[in-house]
Amino acid sequence: MDTESTYSGYSYYSGRSRGSHRHGERSRDHHKSRSKDGSRSEKSVTINAPPAEPLLGDSSVLGEEVQDDNWGETTTAVTGTSEHSLSQEDIVRITKDLEDSVGLDCRRYFSLTLAVVLGLLVFLTPLAFLALPHLLWPDKLLVCGTACEGLFISVAFKLLILLLAVWALFFRAPRAGLPRVFVFRALLAVLVLLFVVSYWLFYGVRILDSQDENYQGIVQYAVSLVDALLFIHYLAIVLLELRQLQPAFSVCVTRSTDGETRHYNLGQLSIQRAALAIIENYYRDFSVHNPALLTASKSRAAKHLAGLKVYNVDGEFPASPATGPENNAATGLAHSQSRAMIAAAARRRDTSHNELYYEEAEHERRVRKRKARLVVAVEEAFTHIRRMQEEEQKKAPGDVMDPREAAQAIFPSMARSLQKYLRTTRQQHCHSMESIQQHLAFCITNNMTPKAFLESYLTPWPTLQYGRERWLARQWTLVSEVSVTSGLKEGAIFLLKCIDFSLVVTAKRIPYIQLSEEFIDPKSHKFVLRLQSETSV
């Protein structure tokens, strides 16, 4: 492990002969295993996601084989072979998902169109109430006095306040597309529509048909409509914003692959809105999903299964009536040998915990060693940067190197150590050369220390802090036994599925807390010290 070949961190050229030799061995082994298994089909369908819409997590990591630590030094190209085979049913399901996504976009624009139409109807109705009498029977209207003109100012300012309030509450960029409609928002929209229609019916029957001459009464009717709309907006704030602020449930969120768990407090929310809040907290609190860390346990299980040789003792060597005593003796000997091999495999299985212990200890030793090398390399690189800055202060202003050029200049000195550490900790797919150089230039620009630069690679970051190509998911799937529009309840369980893992959510109601008060008399803390005269001092 210490005798590693000298290799620049992100160089394209590497040992082609060793890479091709290992690739040939893997191809021959793979060909032998496929020739042994005659039932496996040789046809496979590879579905590649478009680069403009990356999926959550790096899907290329899911199917990668267990590789040695020097894979980056012996790999020169990535072949187009894929081990993911999809059936015809899977292709049909993927096509249906794409059609569903198009339906979601249409539904989102349809909802936006309805909201805009309803908003225009609400704001134009009071103005229409004031303008129609002047257009239809202007000669019959009575003169509008001072009080009537003051109501015009009231209507104008109330409409302006209502416009700003509606813009602040409703016309915001959507955070996500939910599978079902938001019940409270739909109820408020229906309430507003019925309210406006009722006002129009009353206006048509009592004012338009009779051609009412009292214009001040018409203005007061429009003012009452605006006041009622303001109260409905207040009701919307209570139902949509204030109702969910008080915590009512404690939800436990567990990632299915590695078991990472977080707990959150939520208010009175529906299941779909609770799922949206959990996904937002997931991107902020959970570390990025790394499928490469799960390959170690899989490799140990495969190695253990490969070491077991199981024989069919009853059917491997069947005794035939036509065979003689010599064949029966040979059959008994084979049976005894098979039992002995099974017993040896069982003893070897009992010592698997020792192998796990030493394997983890060896991995921790390698991580500590490569971390130490990385820290030393980064400190030397930053020391070189400080010397360069001192030299550049003496140069002319046109000869000063910008942070990007400085990062590119010192990056090769730390690239090899950084790449080896990332491969050992299985983070190489989370950090590209471009992102590392950008982070290095950022640290140089803000005069940050080497420790601040290394913190991004020594400690796993939250999911949202990585590039969008590492975590951006096109769609999450909510799986629930009850309707997603129903509210959270005690013991509610639902799943949030993504491309390569799922979040298991369990809700528990926050218990009712009863506090009691105990009064302590201040006089109970007082005491009297009695001194006896005959006591020696």
Image (cartoon, rainbow, N blue to C red):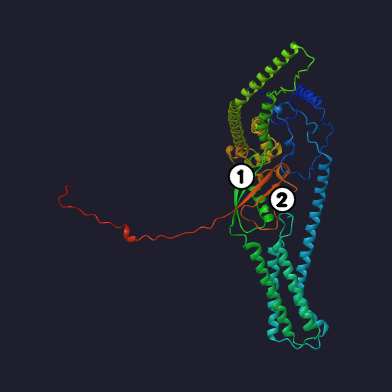
507 in relation to 59, above or below: below
Locate residue 286: give its quadrant: top right
The type of residue carrying mark 1 is Thr
Numbered-mark total: 2
Q: Secondary structure at mark 2?
A: strand
Residue at the image point whose x is 67% and y is 20% from the top? 339
Whole-percent x and y of residue 395? 64, 38
Q: Where's residue 381, x and y in %?
A: 62, 33
Residue 101 in the image: above or below residue 320: below
Classify 10 Å Cα crowding around label 1: few (below 14), some (14-19), many (20 and above): some
Q: What residue lies at 75% left-to-right and 73% top-to-bottom? A: 196
Most foreground residue, 399 or 349: 349
Residue, x 59% and y 49% (percent of image)? Answer: 263
Which residue is the site of mark 2? 478
Residue 348 visible? The answer is yes
Q: Amino acid at mark 2?
A: Leu
Q: Which mark is residue 525?
A: none
Residue 261 is marked as 1
Q: Nearer the viewer, residue 138 or 278?
A: 278
